[in-house]
Every structure is written in structure tokens, then in C-alpha cells.
């Protein structure tokens, strides 16, 4: 069974731009969660989607948004990028959210 | 490689030794605990989990111990190998919540 895939793997943007990251969960998994990982803050929860609905949300500004499609694939969008948004963005999937999460390799976003 | 955390606690061991990585958690209501391994340039990889109704769980070369009295979790790796070198994270989750809280991580360095 293929693992969680994320695209792109690396991205360089400038301040003020917006970015969209994509995540394809493990086949059959309906829950997709997004995390931001930085050296200073560690792994922080952004949001979780289940059956195309945002079920949980972390403490991030509204510039961070996401969505989930009927095939469980998910995208997250960051608008008006700031230097502090530079991070590794990780996607994790699980069958229903209440079970083991499996992470993708992440998208390394650099904001210049 | 990518840094996943500044000033991470570091455990340095010789190949073949047993390693013990510790984690303290703060929420006494947490009832599900997970250990992840993150190698440089990769997303976190699930190692083993344990629920609060257990004190010990064993996997292949790994054992997780849970002490709810002092809110302490440990990961024991038997016969540590150079391939075990990575950052190890513990995560806790409270019943009814789909959102795990991750610790800052411990860097394990295995010397051949």
C-alpha cells in the first residue's frame, strides 16, 4: 500500500505571495491532518479534515486554510506569506482520526 | 540534513547498546501515547503506541513503558543500530480529541 505523498517537496516563495500544498493520504484513509514543523516551535497542529469537513483546527491565523476532496486528498493554502511561515509542512493520514497517523515526507517551504 | 529542533536533548550511544529515550507529559487526562522517529529529510514515522490502560507494550526491538503516576513515558530500543539515529518524538492525546500534542524530541546518535 502506498504511503502518504506530498507535493511539492520543496518550494521557495517571497513575502506576500500565496502557496498551495497537496497531500494524498493512504488509500482508504479518510482523516487528513496538517502540521507545521519549525526548529523553534516543533510540531504544531494546523487542522484536520474528515469526509471533506474541517473537524479540528489549531491555533493558527486565518491565512492558513485547507480543504479536502471527495477522494480524501487534501490541500492547504497559506495566503500573504510571511518570513515566519518558513517551515516543514507535514500531512498525516489515518482511517478515521482516532487511530494511528501516518506522515508524509513533508513540503519544505522557504519564504524569502 | 534538516534540523527538526534547536537545543534538542541528545542521547549518544554505541552500536549494540540499549537506548532509553524519556518523555514527560503534562496532561493527566491523556490516554493515548505514540512514539515517532524522524530521520533527516523525512516525515515522522510511527514506531509504537500505548493506551493508558497498559503499562508496557513491546514491538520489534522496541518497548514503550508508561508510568501514569509520574506522567512519564519511555522508549527502549534494544541493540541500537546506526540506522536508529534520528530524532524521536513522543505524542499524547486525550480521549475524544483527534489532535496529538508532540514533545520537542530527543536526538539519538548511534556510533558504529
Image (spheres, coloured by chain):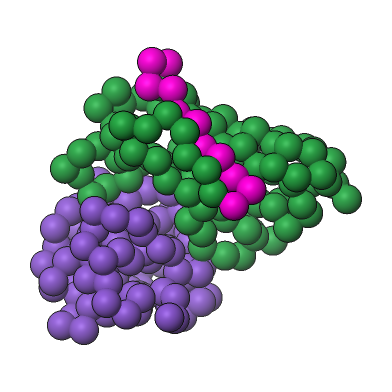
Chain colours: A purple, B green
In depth, the one of B93 and B80 nearer the eye is: B80
Give x and y (percent) for residue B15. Answer: 83, 46
Residue A33: say if magenta.
Answer: no
Seen in the image, is B4 located left or right of residue B102?
right
Quarter of the image with the N terminus of chain B is bottom right
The residue sitting at 27% across, 47% down in the picture is B99
In depth, the one of B45 and B61 nearer the eye is: B61
Q: Please, is residue B43 above or below residue A29 in the view?
A: above
The residue sitting at 41% across, 74% down in the picture is A4
The residue sitting at 47% across, 33% down in the picture is B56
Give x and y (percent) for residue B19. Answer: 70, 37
Query: Of all residues shown, which one is farthest toward the bottom?
Result: A71
Give x and y (percent) for residue B20. Answer: 65, 33
Q: Please, is residue A32 above or below residue B93 in the view?
A: below
| Magenta-highlighted residues | B60-70
Q: Quadrant of residue B5?
A: top right
The residue sitting at 31% across, 32% down in the picture is B53
Residue B73 appears anywhere in the view: yes
Amino acid at each position: 500500500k502506498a504511503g502518504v505523498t506530498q507535493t511539492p517537496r520543496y518550494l521557495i516563495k517571497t513575502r506576500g505571495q500565496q502557496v498551495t500544498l497537496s497531500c494524498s493520504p493512504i488509500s482508504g484513509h479518510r482523516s487528513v491532518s496538517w502540521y507545521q514543523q519549525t526548529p523553534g516551535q516543533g510540531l504544531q497542529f494546523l487542522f484536520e479534515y474528515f469526509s471533506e469537513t474541517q473537524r479540528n483546527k489549531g491555533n493558527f491565523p486565518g491565512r492558513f486554510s485547507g480543504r479536502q476532496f471527495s477522494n480524501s486528498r487534501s490541500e492547504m493554502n497559506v495566503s500573504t506569506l510571511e518570513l515566519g511561515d518558513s517551515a516543514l509542512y507535514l500531512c498525516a493520514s489515518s482511517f478515521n482520526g482516532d487511530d494511528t497517523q501516518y506522515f508524509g515526507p513533508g513540503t519544505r517551504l522557504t519564504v524569502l | 540534513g534538516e534540523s527538526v529542533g534547536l537545543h534538542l536533548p541528545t542521547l549518544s550511544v554505541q552500536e549494540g547498546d540499549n537506548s532509553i529515550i524519556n518523555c514527560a507529559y503534562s496532561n493527566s487526562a491523556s490516554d493515548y501515547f505514540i512514539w515517532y522517529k524522524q530521520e533527516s529529510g523525512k516525515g515522522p514515522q510511527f514506531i509504537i503506541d500505548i493506551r493508558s490502560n497498559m503499562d508496557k507494550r513491546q514491538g520489534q526491538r522496541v518497548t514503550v513503558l508508561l508510568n501514569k503516576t509520574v506522567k512519564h513515558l519511555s522508549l527502549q530500543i534494544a541493540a541500537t543500530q546506526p540506522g536508529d539515529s534520528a530524532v524521536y518524538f513522543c505524542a499524547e492525546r486525550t480521549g475524544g480529541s483527534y489532535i496529538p500534542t508532540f514533545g520537542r524530541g530527543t536526538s539519538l546518535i548511534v556510533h558504529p
